[in-house]
Image (cartoon, coloured by chain):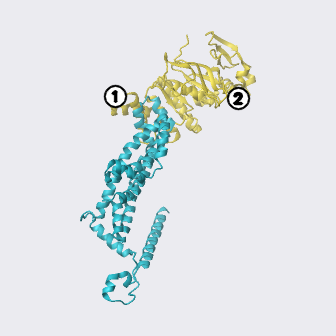
Chain colours: A cyan, B yellow
Amino acid sequence: MTKSLNVRAAVVSIVLFLGFIGAWHLATRSTGSTAAMSPEYAKLMGLTATQGKSAMPGPLDVGAKLWDHLRHPFYDNGPNDKGLGIQLGYSIARVMAGYLLAVAVAIPLGFLIGMSPLMSKALDPFIQVLKPISPLAWMPLALYTIKDSSLSAIFVIFICSIWPMLLNTVFGVASVRKEWVNVARTLEVGTVRRAFTVILPAAAPTILTGMRISIGIAWLVIVAAEMLVGGTGIGYFVWNEWNNLSIVNVIIAILAIGVVGMVLDQVLAQATRLVTFPE
Amino acid sequence: MIDKFISIEGIAKRYPGAAGAGDTTIFENLWLSLPRGEFGCVIGHSGCGKTTVLNILAGLDQPSEGTVIVDDHEIQGTSLDRAVIFQSHALLPWRTVMGNVAYAVSSKWRKWDKAKVRAHAQQFIDLVGLTGSEHKRPSELSGGMKQRVGIARALSITPKIMLMDEPFSALDALTRGSLQDEVRRICLETGQTTFMITHDVDEAMYLADKIFLMTNGPGAVVAEIVENPLPKDRARIDLHRHPYYYALRNHIVDFLVTRSKGFVAANPDHDPLHVPVVRPGLAEPALVLSAASGAAATGAAVSAPAQLRAR
């Protein structure tokens, strides 16, 4: 019955999607010509006034524009007119740079804290204070010290994605089953080899879960960070198109942010599945 | 001169009590020894500290007092000379059967190449009868097969002593029986010195040469050392037909059911350094030797006649 469940779920999804598109279309469609006005005046006023067209673009406008973007994702007509692909590329590159830096710091540090009760107690107050700080609050300080807006955005990604990974690594390492550690102890396995052969595989599913949470947060934060620092990236694109009053492009950007976020999440979910072991 | 391959000398284990109260003593002044090649079994109720004794012997736990000497050396922490078979098998679930055994082998012989490690591990996988399951993961194995891997892993490092902490208590009766046969066969073949913790009387009788009876904790002591009177070539299937079977069984059960509770109060003169050695026989349990005199004293009765015990 699982297959039929999947089929039924797909049908419901499609119906919901079509219903949403239909309602959207109906709500924003032209209602025909309204009051008669001189052609020059009508041209000045645009379709909103002459045909009762909503200022909100309809699904067909968005679809047509989306098709445009998909056909030319990488065009570059100067600083304020770059293809969607280029803008997403900038954002993904920033997220990756900040995120990988965070991985390089959080996982070794998490091992240290998880394996050493002393470090755990000593570092706990710092973590507790730093963790709840909104990543964007770091932005002015980053801009002042780093003096480079692009690097500051990367720093903000770094600081926001480090905490879930750090805490999950600490938890995963500290809660490795004692019997597995005892096996390594009775076999006289040294600390480094034990960390790699017992603790890392045992804690890997928890660590990957932390990495998955982190990439989600990093992708949330990059949009806001790029709105602040400007120049390039999908966050800047959204803000720029808002200034251009191109609601179509804003909607397309929202859609693109969602799709990329989903892909990033699924990659990490797949990686988690690879390191999960059945007991 | 009694051969003391393993010698536990006056160990104690105390846990700090709540504020104001004194420490809780699980056991103290505990002495135990086992000659090379013998199978020793500690039997007692839950909470008497028998697992703690085994963990101290393994080096996983430190005694509050006293020392443990193995092969003329005081033990310092864990060692590849003392392999442990854990109650919960403790296999690494992300490794295959071969991977788990090879991990132990490569931990002992770090310079061996992969082929040599695998060949060595394969011998022990064959020994416990798991040929053909090398590439399975622990989650694909039954409880009995998992414990076989645990035994293969422990044996593969050719330890001086094998330590078993209630290794079969989580298994069903049939599987337990066949694994006991396996362990007995391997121990007899290899002359392995083995120390086991159990609360299963039949298991102790079948496997052990010496059975150490522990009283209830806290403040547990080794009350008696029971020498197994059953023949060395005993088989599980006709064990119960042996004339000494019930004498031995009743003696242990009687201890566990009645005497273990009030033993310390009833025997104020009990000397933990000279624990009486008992060899239950046809007529009545006989004190064969006292560690104090070192002389055989066959026939001397230590407790009530056998017919009173045979309920």
Relative horizontal placement of residue B245, taking residue A245 as reference (left or right): right
> Disc 2 and disc 1: Cα gap in Å?
52 Å
Q: Are marks 2 and 1 on the same chain?
A: yes
x, y (%) of residue A228?
A: 37, 58
Outermost residue toward the front in this view: A144
Tag 2 subunit: B
x, y (%) of residue A218?
A: 40, 53
x, y (%) of residue B244?
A: 65, 23
Q: Residue at x 43, y 75 (%)?
A: A24
Relative horizontal placement of residue B8, taking residue A101 as reference (left or right): right
> Element type at marker 2?
helix
Label 1: which residue?
Answer: B111
Q: Do we see residue B148 in this rendering? A: no
Label 2: which residue?
Answer: B257
Quadrant of the rendered image containing residue B113? top left
Q: Nearer the viewer, residue B64 or B68?
A: B64
**Vertical relation: B58 (above or below) A107:** above
Answer whether labels 2 and 1 touch (C-beta < 8 Å): no
> Element type at marker 1?
loop
